[in-house]
Amino acid sequence: MSNGAHRTAARSTLFQRAGRNDLASPNSPHSADMMAAMEDENEEAFKGLRDDIRRLRGVSDDLGKEIAHHNSILDALEVSLGSAKVGLTKTMRKLDEVTGTSGMGHIWLLLLFAFGVFFFIFLLLKFR
């Protein structure tokens, strides 16, 4: 039995079960050529859908690869920032030890230094 004949027989059985055998009967107003044309249209539409699904699957695979790549970049960045944070924390701790301050004391020293520099520049420009 050919593929087209098998489909027609399967549909005939389906319509008989549903109580509507008008499309599959030989006395149907729809000719065999019309049924074959409808089958061809359906097959073309099916092929188009299959191609669309393959294309979408390829796009989703590409997106998955891109996301994995970006996640690896973000993980590397997180590790780098973590080590930079550790280094900065150590530096701040050493600065506190050198200045003998803790907490916000080094910020006050920095502001006092900046004020002194600006005051010195002001004096230089005023008494020139």
Image: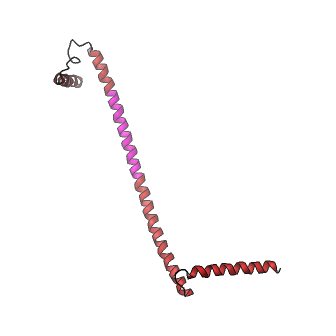
Which quarter of the picture shows residue 35? top left
State the scheme by which the image is colored.
secondary structure
Which quarter of the picture shows residue 68? bottom left
Identify which residue is drawn at 39% across, 51% down: 64
Identify which residue is drawn at 58% across, 79% down: 107
Give the quadrant of the C terminus. bottom right
State the image coordinates of residue 119 (x, y, percent, origin top left): 73, 80
Q: How many marks?
A: 0
**In terms of depth relative to the viewer, which is nearer, 127 or 73?**
127
- Is residue 5 rendered to the left or right of residue 109? left
Identify which residue is drawn at 31% across, 19% down: 37
- Is residue 61 rendered to the left or right of residue 29? right
Q: Is residue 64 above or below residue 35?
A: below
State the image coordinates of residue 22 (x, y, percent, origin top left): 22, 17
Q: Residue furthest right?
A: 128
Q: Is residue 50 above or below residue 9?
A: below
State the image coordinates of residue 103 (x, y, percent, origin top left): 52, 81
**In terms of depth relative to the viewer, which is nearer, 6 or 108?**
108
Give the quadrant of the N terminus. top left
Please tell me whether residue 39 belongs to the stretch shown in magenta.
no
Please tell me whether residue 49 belongs to the stretch shown in magenta.
yes
Helix, strand or loop for the magenta stretch, by majority? helix
**In terms of depth relative to the viewer, which is nearer, 51 or 112?**
112
Q: Is residue 23 above or below residue 69?
A: above
Q: Which residues are magenta?
A: 43-65
Identify which residue is drawn at 46% across, 72% down: 83
State the image coordinates of residue 21 (x, y, percent, origin top left): 19, 19
